[in-house]
């Protein structure tokens, strides 16, 4: 069992991470690089646009902090980070398959969409993706809200999909709404150095690339898990006449 989980997670994480890196390099990274030009421009040339009265809290950058150069260093760093995250999520999916194995490879897409809803869509409703130069609330508070939102969404989806009692399903809806009723931590002033059009493009690009990543990871992991399990793999092969 552990060998099956490890093999599924390893290969799934590698393939999904490479796909995500490719999508980010083609779509997301150019938007980030464009936003960084506004962040690094002299203050006199770029004025932050805000959505409330007041000045934008400044972002503090450590002049000695290392950051990858544009080009192969940035791509390599992105690939490494994506690989670690993808393998971790793939381990989670493979472990869940041992409890409820996908009936068909295509069902992996549903698991992938569930992962997207838990780890991307639900947290994004309160904490949308941010470009460099965007005002943000305290990091610890945002992390705590993100973790709570992901956990509550996972529990809620499990109750809504697998619970037999309608009372448990109602409880699932309530759990799903709790973090959004509480609300995500927000900065005192919503402001950004990048134009609003660029922000909108970045949010759409981030959501779509993550959706493709999760669906691909769900399908790949389900296929590999079934392939490593002869009984499951045989059930999907066409029967001889």
Image (spheres, rainbow, N blue to C red):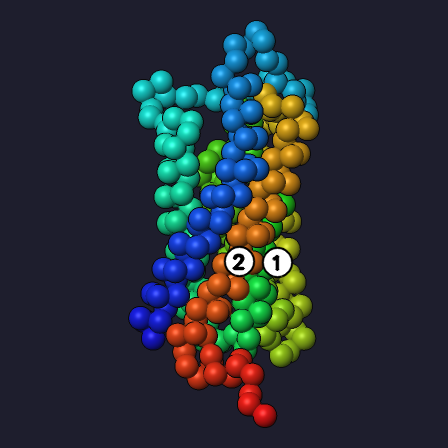
In 3D space, how far apart are the residues under numbered discs 1 and 2 (Cα atoms)?
Answer: 25 Å
**Where is residue 114 shown, x and y percent of the image?**
57, 61
Quarter of the image for the C terminus: give it.
Answer: bottom right
Q: Is residue 233 left or right of residue 192?
A: left
Report which quarter residue 67 is drawn in: top left
Q: Between residues 57 and 48, which one lies in front from this camera angle?
A: 48
Residue reaching furthest to the top: 44
**Picture disc at residue 176:** 1
In the visual, does 1 lie left or right of 90?
left
- Depth order, front residue of 186/74: 74
Q: Residue at x 44, y 55 (%)?
A: 15
Give coordinates of residue 14: x percent, y percent: 40, 54
Upstream in the sequence, badge 1 or badge 2?
1
The answer to the question of whether label 1 and label 2 lie on touching residues, with beta carbons closer than 8 A, is no
Is residue 183 at least partly visible in the picture? no
* Nearer to the camera, 59 or 144: 59
Residue located at (59% from left, 13% from top):
46
Query: Considering depth in this image, is 109 or 46 the residue closer to the camera?
Result: 109
Name the element at disc 1. Answer: helix
Position above or below: 56 against 239: above
Q: Residue at x 67, y 27 (%)?
A: 196
- Dot 2 falls on a residue whose secondary structure is helix
- x, y percent for residue 127: 58, 41
Which quarter shows the N terminus? bottom left
As drawn, 143 above or below 12: above
Residue 113 visible in the displayed image: yes
The residue labelled by disc 2 is: 216
Residue 43 in percent (x, y) is at: 54, 10
């Amino acid at each position: 069992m552990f060998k099956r989980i490890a093999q599924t997670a390893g290969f799934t994480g590698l393939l999904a991470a490479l796909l995500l890196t490719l999508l980010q390099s083609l779509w997301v990274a150019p938007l980030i690089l464009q936003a960084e030009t506004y962040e690094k421009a002299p203050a006199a040339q770029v004025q932050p646009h805000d959505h409330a009265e007041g000045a934008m809290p400044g972002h503090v950058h450590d002049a000695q902090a290392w950051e990858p150069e544009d080009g192969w260093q940035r791509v390599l760093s992105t690939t490494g980070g994506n690989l670690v995250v993808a393998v971790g999520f793939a381990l989670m999916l493979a472990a869940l398959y041992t409890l409820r194995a996908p009936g068909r490879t295509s069902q992996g897409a549903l698991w992938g969409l569930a992962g997207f809803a838990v780890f991307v869509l639900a947290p994004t409703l309160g904490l949308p993706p941010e470009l460099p130069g965007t005002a943000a609330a305290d990091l610890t508070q945002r992390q705590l809200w993100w973790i709570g939102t992901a956990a509550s969404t996972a529990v809620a989806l499990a109750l809504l999909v697998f619970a037999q009692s309608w009372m448990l399903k109602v409880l699932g809806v309530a759990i799903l709404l709790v973090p959004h009723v509480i609300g995500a931590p927000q900065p005192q002033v919503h402001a950004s150095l990048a134009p609003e059009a660029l922000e909108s493009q970045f949010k759409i690009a981030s959501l779509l690339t993550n959706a493709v990543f999760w669906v691909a990871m769900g399908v790949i992991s389900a296929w590999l898990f079934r392939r490593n399990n002869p009984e499951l793999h045989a059930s999907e092969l066409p029967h001889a006449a």
